[in-house]
Each structure stands twice: as C-alpha cells, then as structure tokens.
Image (cartoon, grey):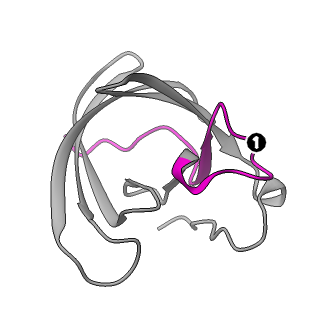
Amino acid sequence: MGAKLPIRVGIYGNVSENCSDPANAGILSFNGQGLSDVHTHDCHMTIESHQGKLFAYSQKCVVTGTGAGPSSIGPGLMRIESDKRFALYRKGGETIFNYCEPASLPPGIAVPKNN
C-alpha cells in the first residue's frame, strides 16, 4: 500500500512505564520507516491495509540490538489513537504506547530523526 503511519517519529513507552526511567523492554523507537525495540533495528514497515484507526502491517527487521545479523519478517496489527499514542496487538493481547518527549528521556536513549 505504501501508506505511512500517522504517528510522530520518536520514542514510545509502554503505558506502564515512565518516560524518565523506562525499562528497555518497554520502549519502541519509530524512525518513520518502522518500529524497533531493544532486540531489533533497521526495521522497514509496509502497511498492508488500514480501516479507520486499525493498521495491518508487515515489518522486516534485523534481529540484533546493533550490527549485522539475521532478518525476520512478521505481521502486525495496531490501532492509532493519536499522533502520540497507539496500541499494538500481540499474542498476549493489547499493549498501549505513548510518545515520550525527548527532554523527558534519560541520557543514552537515542531519539530517531525523520528519515
């Protein structure tokens, strides 16, 4: 489809996390191309379909925190609530993420820039 997600580029924290002291497992990074976590990078998302606030996608990521490594491709489903809030649907259910303002993040968390 080629559509882009209508969310801000930046760091998102699980709603159970505090942006000023997040657990690595509770944050996602969106660089405008894909969503990565502590175990993935160089992610590229393709929007397969969307209806209203629901977006079905597939995403290819390098499955290492940094550097070269194997890639994986997986499907996903998310609901965009605003440009600063979305929910991911996974095997364990729904997880909601909120945008973290860069100034609220601890030092050492790299904030992605628009690609």
Q: Is residue 5 magenta?
A: yes
Q: Position of residue 82 (x, y in %)?
A: 59, 27
Q: Position of residue 104 (x, y in %)?
A: 82, 54
Q: Residue furthest top?
A: 52
Quadrant of the rendered image containing residue 113: bottom right
Given the current orientation, which residue lies at the most extreme bottom position?
Answer: 67
Please name the residue shown 26% across and 35% down the image: 76
The residue lying toward the viewer, choosing from 6 and 65, is: 65
Q: What percent of the width, then of the height, locates residue 10?
A: 60, 55
Q: Is residue 61 left or right of residue 14?
A: left
Instruction: Give residue 81's position: percent from left, percent from top.
Output: 55, 22
Between 68 and 33, the one nearer to me in the picture? 68
Q: Is residue 101 above or below residue 41?
A: above
Quarter containing the N terminus: top left
Q: In this rendering, is residue 72 above or below 42?
A: above
Foreground of the two, 16 or 33? 16
Q: Residues within 10 Å of mark 1 (few under 14, many from 20)?
A: some
Which quadrant of the view contains residue 85?
Answer: top right
Query: Is 87 positioned to the left or the right of 43 in the image?
Result: right
Residue at x-position 54% and y-position 64%: 114
Specify the amino acid type for callout 1: Asn
Instruction: Please provide the residue range marked out in magenta.
Output: 1-25
At 48% from the left edge and 37% from the top edge, which residue is drawn? 6
Dot 1 lies on which element? Answer: loop
Q: Which residue is mark 1?
A: 18
- Apparent side of residue 53 relative to residue 29 in the rendered image (left or right): left
Left or right of residue 4, residue 9 in this image:
right
